[in-house]
Image (cartoon, helix red, strand yellow):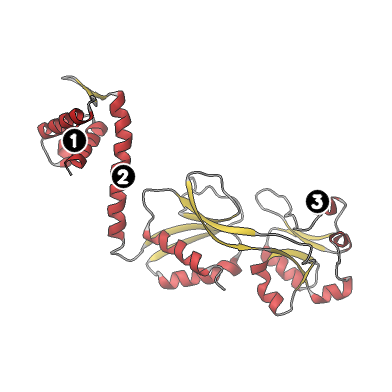
Amino acid sequence: MDNLAGVSAFVQSAETLSFVEAGRLLGVSASAIGKSIARLETRLGVRLFHRSTRSMTLTAEGALFLQRCQRILGEMAAAEQELSDTRSAPRGKLRVSLPLVGSLLNPVLAEFIRQYPQIELEVDFSDRRVEVIEEGFDAVIRVGETEDSRLMSRQLGTFHLQLVAAPGYLRQAGIPQQPADLRQHACLLYKFPTTGKVESWPVPGWDKILGDGLRTSVVCNSVDTLIYLAEQGQGIACLPDFAVKQALAGQGLQQVLGEHSHHTGSFKILWPSSKHLAPRLRVFIDLLSERLFSA
């Protein structure tokens, strides 16, 4: 404990460059701070400050030691805060960015709101790639990988893209037997709103099929619209399995080229690395992990 007190005295002195101010912040005299720093320097065998009657500055060794000590005290404060948080119900504002997959996320959001009424949930539904830290989000859900080392992540589950069409459309236009047969079909394509690129379908030779002049019926950036148009018999669409699960079970849609399409994607939740995880964010991550792909 004496060592920790010495570290606290050193950090306050280094941040204020004043024994008097450090003593005021810690509730002790400037003389006590000076003696604590002297004992610390003796134990370490280095000088931590250049001191004169008019000024005080850190030595090179002192600057290096300060970085370590700040992290140590930060971890101590975070541990105390986490223990304190466990004694109170999660509360406060939680700002999250979610992809446009309401059919998957809406039931979980409703359950979260019921379970944690003291949390104010602000949801931004968007398929653009938001900047988590710069835009002030507490967490985002993304598909695929992230290269931002400032973020922590947890995988929530996986999904598969499937080619689907209404039975009525297939009776009229025929069932494609090979990927190349897609050239003779009306295709409903998804365009990423951020890049403007059309989503690739998970079938062999897709780029060539698309480049040869695919008969496109619709291009849009709404999964819900593509589902509706496919159910209305307007063509073949490529959609995530969770979005068409009910339509397939009710035979409103039928999978095609299943033996030729191979795809696996993942949903991850990401949040800024910080000294500690706020209770409102922890329970949000835990509930998503438990419920999102449990059915």
Marks 3 and 1 close (CB-CB < 8 Å) = no
x then y, percent, for residue 192: 68, 53
Tell me the amino acid under the disc marked 3.
Asp
Which label's residue is closer to the chain start, 2 or 1? 1
Q: Nearer the viewer, residue 89 or 36?
A: 36
Query: For the residue labelled by badge 3, is the local secondary structure a helix, a strand or a loop?
Result: helix
Tell me the amino acid under the disc marked 1.
Ala
Tag shown at residue 22: 1
Q: Distance from label 2 to label 3 (Cα)?
A: 52 Å
Which label's residue is closer to the chain start, 2 or 3? 2
Where on the picture, by quarter, is residue 47? top left
Q: Which of 81 and 198 is in front in this view?
A: 81
- Write the residue at 50% across / 49% down: 132
Q: Distance from label 2 to label 1 (Cα)?
A: 17 Å
Residue designated by label 3? 207
Residue designated by label 2? 74
